[in-house]
Amino acid sequence: MRFLFFFVLLIFSASLNGQGYISPEGDTVSTRAYASVGLFFPNLTTSLRVDSKNGLGTDLGLEDDFNFDERIAVFYAQAVVRVKNRSQFVLAFENMSRNSSLEIDRDIEIGDTSFYIGARLDLKFDVNYYALTWRYSFFNHPNWNAGVSFGLRAAEFVVKADATFNGSEYGESSSVIAPSVLFGLHGSGYLTDRLLARYSIEYFALSVEDLTINVLETRASLEYFILKNVGVGAAYSTSQYVVEDFPLSNDFEGRVLFDFSGGNLFLSARF
């Protein structure tokens, strides 16, 4: 309910204030595109299991079992491009890379490899996140818009484990791209001629036989343009991925539960 409340509040506030960023007259905030780059500070929760063809792997809680950092700073980039008065595309990218090294206190199965108690294990887990969203505005006014969205997501998970045990070195690596399709709502509005607010919520769920995909994303942001075309901004976003039994992968079996939520500080430009 709080997501819907924020969405309605954004539309109501924007309809009372500001100058239009999508109006065709060519005023200072009627722009073709927005671009932003900055740092994202997510709080991470990760559960991972890499199976073999002979059986299930070990469920690993990376933050609890391997002391992975729960909070990191990562690069974030986004572009919003208007192609027609009611239509725009949003592109985003971020990379999250973490690793940990410790002496394990139990036997662990990762893919086809067994890591025995007492081994020194170096574990690395990378996530490359790609987003492409098309937005259509049913409400299209001089100072605000709102409508529906259709998005494509690709989260690339890369796992690499190297161990040393009784003088021997061995390891295991695996990667998979988890695609998803999201449907949602979006809204943007100028609260003043310099202050732009945005909100979006997108969701997708699918459960067919052994395949389970559940993705929820939200993002709320404020941008203040200190110059005509240059601004600073802050945002808060949440992303929750649950994927089991990857259907498009030949070299990865298992599941990934990945949750990253946090604040974002960025520089923005409008063109």
Image: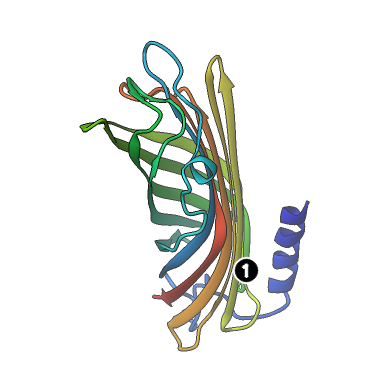
Q: Residue furthest bottom?
A: 227
- Pick the residue in front: 40 or 92: 40
Rendering colour mode: rainbow
- Pick the residue in front: 112 or 167: 167
Give me the residue at 37% from left, 18% from top: 52
- Please say if 197 is above or below 92: below
Residue where numbered disc 1 is placed = 144
Q: Tell me where residue 91 appears, x and y as whole percent.
A: 41, 55
Q: Amino acid at mark 1?
A: Trp
Res. 143 image quadrant: bottom right
Q: Residue furthest left?
A: 168
One can see residue 43 in this view: yes
Q: Is residue 110 left or right of residue 20?
A: left
Q: Is residue 113 left or right of residue 218?
A: left
Give the number of callouts: 1
Give me the residue at 45% from left, 87% from top: 228
Q: Tell me where residue 42 appears, x and y as whole percent.
A: 52, 58
Q: Is residue 197 left or right of residue 159?
A: right
Q: Tell me where residue 18 appears, x and y as whole percent.
A: 64, 81
